[in-house]
Image (cartoon, rainbow, N blue to C red):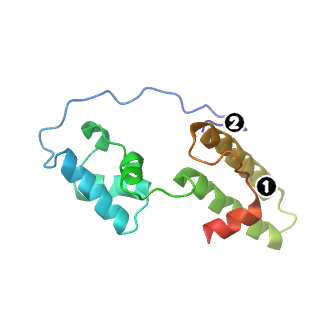
Amino acid sequence: MARMYSRKRGKSGSKKPRKKKHEWIMYNKEEVEKLIVKLAKEGYLSSQIGMVLRDQYGVPDVREFELRITKVLEKHGFSKAVPEDMFNLMKKAIALRRHLEKNKKDGISKRGLILTESKIRRLGKYYIKTGKLPADWKYSPEKAKLLVK
């Protein structure tokens, strides 16, 4: 998400140009899909799968094969209850709460927790609209703590 609470610039900018398939890629669409499933079975998250494909298998971007890692994972039954970006934000919020239990006067961390939980709620609204979360989903720190463990 863009920088909502600071005076820094947003994330807008040019996108990568759509290129033709690179000749040096040794894999086809089916093989890349099998690699994604294999890495998911090994326990990699979707963001980690992209990096492993890039660094170890020489696949610069799965979009060249008209694939999306999360779509392939959903197709093969590896989808999570909560999307990965929201899960990472929840882990961050839990760590901030744990820190604030020990350091009650840390005002900067209090603000960071407020901003993080606000971002979780905004993402929750988006995922409810798109159908990735149930309509009655609501963020609570206690449920998040159970979910992350």
Q: Which residue is mark 2?
A: 4
The image shows residue 38 at horizontal and vertical percentages of: 29, 63
Q: Quadrant of residue 127?
A: top right
The Cα–Cα distance between marks 2 and 1, rounded to whole angstroms, is 17 Å
Question: Does dot 1 land on a helix, a strand or a loop?
Answer: helix
Q: Is residue 91 left or right of residue 31?
A: right
Question: Does dot 2 land on a helix, a strand or a loop?
Answer: loop
* Quarter of the image that includes the N terminus: top right
- The front one of 59 and 35 is 35
- The front one of 40 and 115 is 40
Q: Residue at x 61, y 31 (%)?
A: 9
| 149 up-or-down from 49: above or below | below
Q: Quadrant of residue 105?
A: bottom right
Q: Which residue is mark 1?
A: 108
The image shows residue 132 at horizontal and vertical percentages of: 56, 46
Label 1 crowd bin: few (<14), some (14–19), many (20+), radius 10 Å:
few
* Quarter of the image that includes the C terminus: bottom right
| 17 up-or-down from 29: above or below | above
